[in-house]
Image (tube, rainbow, N blue to C red):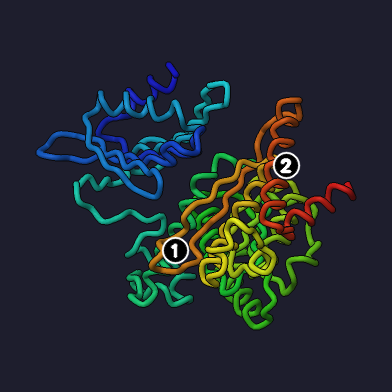
Amino acid sequence: MNELSKLLQENLNIEFISATLSNPKKKDDVQKVKVRPVLKKEVLYFQFESFRNNQAFHENVEEKKACEILLEYMGNMRQMQMETQRADYTVLVSKKGKVTIKSKIKKGGKKKIDMSHDRKKKYVLEEGVPVPFLQDLGVMTQDGKIVRAKSDKFRQINRFLEFIEDILPELDKGRELTILDFGCGKSYLTFAMYYYLHELKEYDIRIIGLDLKKEVIRHCNELSEKYGYEKLRFLEGDIADYTGVNKVDMVVTLHACDTATDYALAKAVGWDAKVILSVPCCQHELNRQIRNEVLEPVLRYGLLKERMAALITDGLRAQYLEREGYEAQILEFIDMEHTPKNILIRAVKRNQKADQKESVRRQQIEASIRKCEAELRVSPTLGRLLDNQGKTE
């Protein structure tokens, strides 16, 4: 960590803009840390915002202490994105503790830093900065203000982009990346992905949006052409039958109903996608199947049975992805008050060698899944799809 310590000592000063630490080694530890400068009575502090169990904790510390805390956090984190007025830095930590630091020197003038203590929440897409697709989709006015009735949608879009921001180091910036969005609908988030990755982060990406609604697809393609988004195209089609590509880097599935999510996840695994982002929608399959004598007093209540079945469905989906070599997380997408469909499954392909240790790990996950399914008498679609894929390979 000597190289990282030197980097922090050189940059924790008045030119520091922000840092985001993510991808924890331990899932029950702090999940994410954001750092920014704060000026209080002409003294420079660094504000730490750490996230654990869907709660945020804040602490303001001076420069020397900030360096110590950052190094301590990086003992559990695998990546850090840091921005200063001079450069952008990406710090990656391997499982063996090897630190890799990548830097990109900025061109042009210095970025103005807001160091007020009680500033407004900083979004990936900021209010006051006009974004054409948000204007046409009715989220933003022509002068960049957020339409009050669409403020939840604006927060949702930014929350989604934060999830993508976390996995940027997993995406190869040296080649064209293919992203598939299954069940794209009106495509708020599809346009946001393209705008963020291509326009703001300068990735060479090709995004394909897929949906069954012909009129929606037509409208989205018109908007894409209007903005000059040459590599953003929308197609009419079904998730289960789509065969338009052979290799995909990231698969996004947002609110695909019931087992449509399972077909999308199975497709993603079959394509060996590096990143999977899935927000499930209505889920009925396990609700029809689930039976357990011990849980019978609870399952007799329809509402509770429905919610339990949905949670078990997503838990098993994450475990199946773990079995297939992914590191899966179940995260809160947006607050419960906005929508009950607030779970996001994020899975990143592990860079694990096919050795004996990895084989044992997958066997243990498989045994755990089968035991759970037997106890609850359920047979999820995703499990059957992945098993069939394995037989045909």
Q: Residue at x 57, y 53 (%)?
A: 345
Reading the image, the residue beneath label 2 is 366
Image position, residue 259 (x, y; %): 69, 66
Question: What is the three-letter code of the residue carrying label 2?
Answer: Glu
Up/down of 368 relative to 224, above or below? above
Apparent side of residue 71 relative to residue 263 in the rendered image (left or right):
left
Q: Residue furthest left?
A: 41
User: Can residue 350 be seen here?
Assistant: yes
Q: Nearer the viewer, mark 1 or mark 2?
A: 2
The crowd level at tag 1 (other Cα within 10 Å; few <14, some 14-19, many 20+) is some
Apparent side of residue 171 relative to residue 84 in the rendered image (left or right):
right
**Could you tell which of marks 1 and 2 lies nearer the N-terminus?**
1
Q: CA distance from mark 1 to mark 2?
A: 34 Å
Q: Residue at x 66, y 62 (%)?
A: 291
Q: Give the image quarter of residue 71.
A: top left
Q: Residue at x 61, y 77 (%)?
A: 222
Which is nearer the eye, 217 or 359? 359
User: Can residue 88 be seen here?
Assistant: no
Image position, residue 203 (x, y; %): 58, 49
Image position, residue 328 (x, y; %): 59, 45
Q: Residue furthest bottom?
A: 215
Question: What is the three-letter code of the residue carrying label 1?
Answer: Gln
